[in-house]
Image: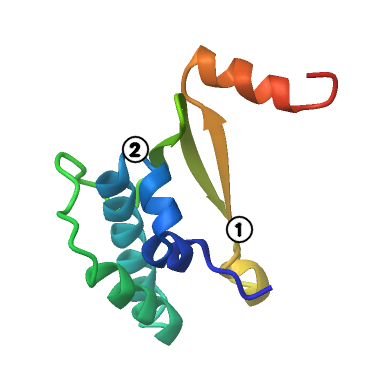
Amino acid sequence: AGVNLVRLIATQPVFREAIVNWAEVVGDFRQRVRLEARTSGHDPILSELAGVLDALDVAEPEGKTDPGSPFMALKMRQGDLVLSLFSTIASFGTARDITVNDLRIELFFPADEATAQILRGLGPGG
């Protein structure tokens, strides 16, 4: 409860060390949080998170023209092991139900066969 992935990635050195494409991930998070802060009517929590990300010395991602893109690439390393993942974001909401309007689910998928095999090995019977 109360754990925020954006804040953890921005403030915990273990994430900076483990994420191979650190600048790209921070840039993607920065664009997403800024967009959500604007579209939410400048929610104070989102605005504060945008400030945390803006304080990082990371350039904007090159070639990414759609800050609302539901796709993000993530490469994580532990020792010699590198996992290549991509994420998609699903959001739920209707004009009738404000309680689900802000709900977002981010799902990560293997971006290559080597990562898929590693992840399958982590599951039951793996």
Q: Residues within 10 Å of mark 1 (few under 14, many from 20)?
A: few
83 in relation to 48, above or below: above
Image spot of residue 98 (x, y percent)? 62, 76
Which quadrant of the figure has residue 51? bottom left
| Rendered image: mark on residue 81 | none
Quick one: 33 or 75, which is closer to the camera? 75
Disc 1 marks a residue whose amino acid type is Phe
**Residue where numbered disc 1 is placed:** 92
Residue identifier under label 2: 20
Judge whether residue 70 can be spotted in this image: no
Instruction: Please tell me how crowded label 2 is: few (under 14), some (14-19), or many (20+) other residues with Cα within 10 Å.
Output: some
Q: Nearer the viewer, residue 5 or 77?
A: 77
Q: Is residue 37 above or below residue 21?
A: below
Quarter of the picture containing the N terminus is: bottom right
Q: How many marks?
A: 2
Q: Earlier in the sequence, mark 1 or mark 2?
A: 2
Dot 2: element: loop
Mark 1 → mark 2, Cα distance in angstroms: 31 Å
- Quadrant of the rendered image containing residue 59: bottom left
> Compared to 4, does 43 lie above or below?
below
